[in-house]
Amino acid sequence: MENRILGIHHITAIAGTAKRNFNFYTNVLGLRFVKKTVNFDDPETYHFYFGNETGSPGTILTFFPWEGTAPGRRGTGMATEIGYSVPAGSLDFWLTRFQERGILYNKPTERFGETYLPFLDPDGLKLELIVSKTADERAPWETADVNADVATKGFHNVTLTLESIKNTADLLTDIFSYQLVEQHVNRYRFTTDAVPNAALVDLVEVPGEKRGQVASGTIHHVAFRVKDDAAQMAFRERIAARGFNVTEPLDRNYFHSIYFREPGGVLFEIATDNPGFTVDEPLGELGTNLKLPPQYEPRRAQIESQLPVL
């Protein structure tokens, strides 16, 4: 756990309707609603966090649900797919569940020796349920109808779609210490041995394809994990030394963050493990209270009146 990138910390996407987004990820996918807060830059918009029981790094999918936002478009220069790890033998359960609930999906297929089930959330965000070929011992969050035998474990991989992968691949290998481990046609899989799970980044190279547009149903940024602030600052120095415009550390209440755009155009974040999601509410109450950044507490009544009812 020295100064290394420890895989994916979280992924943040954009939704068009708060209530629909909340219902899909809690009631259909069975994720825990870990935190209900607001966008730091737009406090009349929610910021939702979904994950496992504790909100462990590598399980957290977050959303800015901007009501009425137009649909985005997948394309180059963005993260385009999110892969969740699920137990062997669980895909039949998910197929039935998606059929019963009218979820758009494609039939399971194989890639890199793993079976995956692609589907779309209500805003068109592309996700995949993947039976990993390596053991995933993470304890899932269980609900009344999504038990541990089928529940998602956390992230398996994230996919970036790029016109050219070269400079992004160099960043992953030279600064983040990832390694290229597999390739199929135009998909290149990189991994880190620093952690057993949430360790994979796929780069898909599509020269000449139209650039994506970040809006509803698309991924806003990908956050990579480091142990603490000291590790984050070490990476900030390395990133800045390579000529990237990287922010100063920002306090996001539940982790500390720096941001920069990788060479292909995707917004990257490096986020710390500390302080975690129990910093402002106990484990048993995660996601049950509206938590505001301290600067917005004096406006709580006004903010609550503006936020959509869930």
Image (cartoon, rainbow, N blue to C red):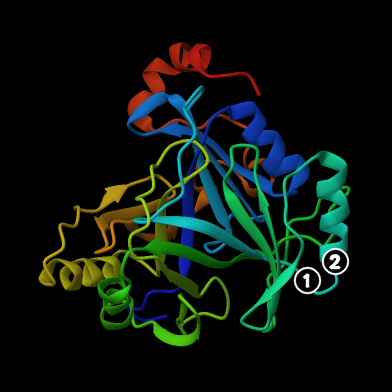
Residue 66 at x, y percent in the picture: 47, 28
In the rendered structure, which amino acid carries the disc numbered 2? Asp
Q: CA distance from mark 2 to mark 1?
A: 6 Å
Left or right: 193 in relation to 268: right
Left or right: 269 in relation to 304: left
- Measuring 24% from the left and 56% from the top, which residue is drawn there? 260
- Measuring 84% from the left and 53% from the top, which residue is drawn there? 146
In the rendered structure, which amino acid carries the disc numbered 1? Pro
Label 1: how many Cα within 10 Å (few below 14, some 14–19, many 20+):
some
Residue 21 vertical placement versus 13 (above, below): above
Residue 48 vertical placement versus 169 (above, below): above
**For marks 2 and 1 on the same chain, the one whose residue lies earlier in the sequence:** 1
Left or right: 83 in relation to 45: right
Toward which corner of the image does residue 82 lie, by quadrant?
bottom right
Toward which corner of the image does residue 106 lie, by quadrant?
bottom right
Which label belongs to residue 149? 2
Tally the marks.
Answer: 2
- Describe the element under mark 2 as helix, strand or loop: loop
Residue 137 visible (yes or no): no
Position of the C terminus, as image quadrant, is: top right
Which of the two residues, 34 or 179, is positioned nearer the viewer here? 179
Which of the two residues, 41 or 255, is positioned nearer the viewer here? 41
Position of the N terminus, as image quadrant, is: bottom left
Which of the two residues, 14 or 148, is positioned nearer the viewer here? 14
Residue 198 at x, y percent in the picture: 54, 70
- 2 and 1 marks in contact (CB < 8 Å): yes
Which label belongs to residue 87? 1
- Describe the element under mark 1 as helix, strand or loop: loop
Which of the two residues, 305 or 207, is positioned nearer the viewer here? 207
**Residue that extends furthest to the front in the rendered view of this protein:** 208
- Measuring 87% from the left and 62% from the top, which residue is drawn there? 92
Residue 46 vertical placement versus 88 (above, below): above
